[in-house]
Amino acid sequence: INQIGRIERAEINTTLKTIFKIAKALDIEISVFFSDNQ
């Protein structure tokens, strides 16, 4: 969870592999992270 916070605050860059893992854990489509809808 700490790493997710750091990603949200743009303190670190992440890989697509990590984004896929987060999406899978949250049971959401990866496209949610790249959507303009908030």
Image (cartoon, helix red, strand yellow):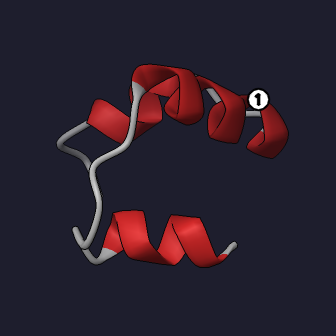
- Give the vertical position of 4 relative to 13 (above or below): below
The answer to which of 35 and 23 lies nearer the viewer is: 23
Residue tagged by mark 1?
Answer: 24
Residue sitting at x 44%, y 35%: 32
31 sits left or right of 30 in the view: left
Percent across and percent down for residue 35 are 27, 35
Percent across and percent down for residue 33 are 39, 39
| Residue type beneath disc 1 | Lys
Q: Quick one: label 1, few (<14), some, or many (20+) residues within 10 Å?
A: few
- Give the vertical position of 7 relative to 9 (above or below): above
Tell me where residue 3 sits by quadrant.
bottom right
Q: In the orientation shown, which residue stands out farthest toward the front?
A: 12
Tell me where residue 11 sits by quadrant.
bottom left
The answer to which of 12 and 33 lies nearer the viewer is: 12
Percent across and percent down for residue 1 are 70, 72
Count numbered badges in the picture. Answer: 1
38 sits left or right of 23 in the view: left
Residue sitting at x 29%, y 61%: 12
Q: Of helix, strand and loop, which one carries label 1?
A: helix
Residue sitting at x 40%, y 30%: 15
Percent across and percent down for residue 23 are 65, 34
The answer to which of 36 and 8 lies nearer the viewer is: 8
- Give the vertical position of 15 relative to 38 (above or below): above
